[in-house]
Image (cartoon, grey):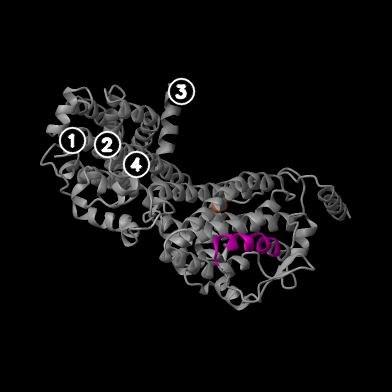
Amino acid sequence: METINFEERFQEYVHSEQKVEPKHWMPEPYRKTLIRQISQHAHSEVVGMLPEANWISRAPSLRRKVALLAKVQDEAGHGLYLYSAAETLGADRADLVGDLLSGKAKYSSIFNYPTRSWADIGAIGWLVDGAAIANQVMLCRTSYGPYARAMVRICKEESFHQRQGYEIMLALCKGTKEQKEMAQDALNRWWWPSLMMFGPTDKESTNSAQSMNWKIKRKSNDELRQEFIDKTVPQAEFLGLTIPDEQLEWDEKTGHYRFGPIDWEEFYHVLKGNGPCNKERLEARNKAHDDGRWVREAANAFAKKTQERKGEHSAA
Amino acid sequence: MENPLLSYTLFLADNSLITGQRLSEWCGHGPILEQDIALSNIALDHLGQARMLLQYAAEQKGEGWTEDRLAYFRDEKNFRNLLMTELPKGDWGYTVMRAFLYDTYHFYEMTSLLQSKDKQLRAIAQKAIKEIRYHAQWSAEWVIRLGDGTEESHQRIKRSLVELWPFTGEFFETDEAASGLNANGIAPSYTHIRTQWNAKVEEVLALATLERPADGWMQSGGRKGAHTEHMGYLLAEMQHIPRSYPDAQW
Ligand SMILES: [Fe+2]
Ligand SMILES: [Fe+2]
């Protein structure tokens, strides 16, 4: 009886648009859902560093090099905020990272695609950060306080990333024939995976309804996807690029773009680990972790020694 | 021959550029996220300094030179950076030991440049000195932590120290251009910097329970454009896009 009561009150509480804070009572499934979602989000930020970090050493101008390095560093910062937010729910960062490294935890599949040319850095900023923003702007109003606040900080940086990405595309599209081809090729490869970032269609999405009811999510996958398409198509037109969807068409009646079918089979394949770079990404994270073990051990040993020496001092 | 101020500006610029390029290789691969961020930050500082210095060098060269043309379209033999800066990144201990030896030197060098008679170099030193002091502190702390950490970390960083030591002699070489600039109050006295560097390095190594290697044979050549084999690969990677599309703007 008690529990039911608590849950009802919790439901009323989130429906009255108040934030849930770490010390509040919350239903276990709410806590679990959030830990899973926030940690997946954190892992995505961290794994997402890899495809772009690839290009830091090869960035074609010093200005671009500095901007890209700063961007990838921002993503590491996002990972940190999010791991901290997950820790407020009682999760342990080391365990969460362990789940990523063992392949148990998921991260956004988009990062399992390769970055083949410099234009991919533009396309990722424009499309991938753009799709992330659509989702994250919604999450700025999510019911869990620490998550919502982390998102506010993150969103500011993400919109900067998106502008930066678009600016790279713009420079390429105003450039030589080869540069423009590079830009079109990148759009061709990143368009569909970006649409898949919003997750399965509402019909297929199993967790969505509960998350909406808890006010964790506020818009459905399909709504967010449509918003993203409506916003992005004119941007592609401005660049003079063609979106690789023959069925893409403005619908006067609905005020939205209609688009062709998404290849969900590919989506599930990449999700299952069969994407072009799943193996490389996890290997890179594991290598960094393994190579860093002696460093972390030394830092801990030194911190302990320093603590002990302080103790000796104050004892004397 | 190039004018001495230009040579010297490029020497400073190339040290920062190549250091920034090497350090940025760690981005996404650090031992822990917090340190990944710290090192990326430091790499960004070096690249920022490199840009200011290359812009100044480009201004001196005139004739359509830009920071990017200097970074991407010069051949290896025209890069003047110290050999130590171009060595591969190695493990974390190697990276922080190299950073420590170089940052300490860089700190005293830039501190002296705060008094330079050259207005631009002085302004660049003023802009950069705070971050360079932080770099020197950060890397000294890591050397101490690893030297006085575990047996494994001690052995690893000791090996890095020994491997890197022969590349420290080059820090203090002065060619004709540099000594002329020193006489004019533009460049610092590297003999004086050596004294300061020696004292600081000994102090930090002692805290790290590491022994200062003896000064034996020292490697040399960076200033004259005689680089290690690593430099060619570094430049190939860094320069290949602009060189593949020489007419393109990015
Ligand atoms: Fe991010
Ligand atoms: Fe981002």
Q: Which mark is residue B146?
A: 4
Give residue A269's quadrant in the image: bottom right
Looking at the picture, tell me which residue is in the foreground, B104 or A225: A225
Magenta region = A226-241
Q: Chain of mark 4?
A: B
Q: Position of residue A252 (x, y in %)?
A: 76, 68
Q: Main secondary structure of the magenta part?
A: helix
Q: Chain of mark 1?
A: B
In the image, what residue occupies the spot 29% across and 21% down? B115
Tags 2 and 1 touching, CB below 8 Å: yes
Distance, label 2 to label 3, CA atoms, is: 59 Å
Q: Which residue is mark 3?
A: A314
Q: Position of residue B166 (x, y in %)?
A: 16, 42
- Mark 2 falls on what kind of element? helix
Q: Which residue is mark 2?
A: B60
Looking at the picture, tell me which residue is in the foreground, B106 or A7: B106
Distance, label 4 to label 3, CA atoms, is: 25 Å
Ligand 2 under 8 Å from disc 2 Cβ: no
Q: Amino acid at mark 4?
A: Leu
Q: Which residue is mark 1?
A: B3
Ligand 1 under 8 Å from disc 4 Cβ: no
Q: Callout 1: 10 Å neighbours few (<14), some, many (20+)?
A: few
- Sequence-first disc among 1 and 4: 1
Q: Is residue A179 magenta?
A: no
Q: Callout 4: 10 Å neighbours few (<14), some, many (20+)?
A: many
Distance, label 1 to label 4, CA atoms, is: 43 Å
Image position of A60 (left or right of A103) = left
Dots 4 and 3 on the same chain:
no
- Front: mark 2 or 3: 2
- Front: mark 4 or 3: 4
Q: Callout 2: 10 Å neighbours few (<14), some, many (20+)?
A: some
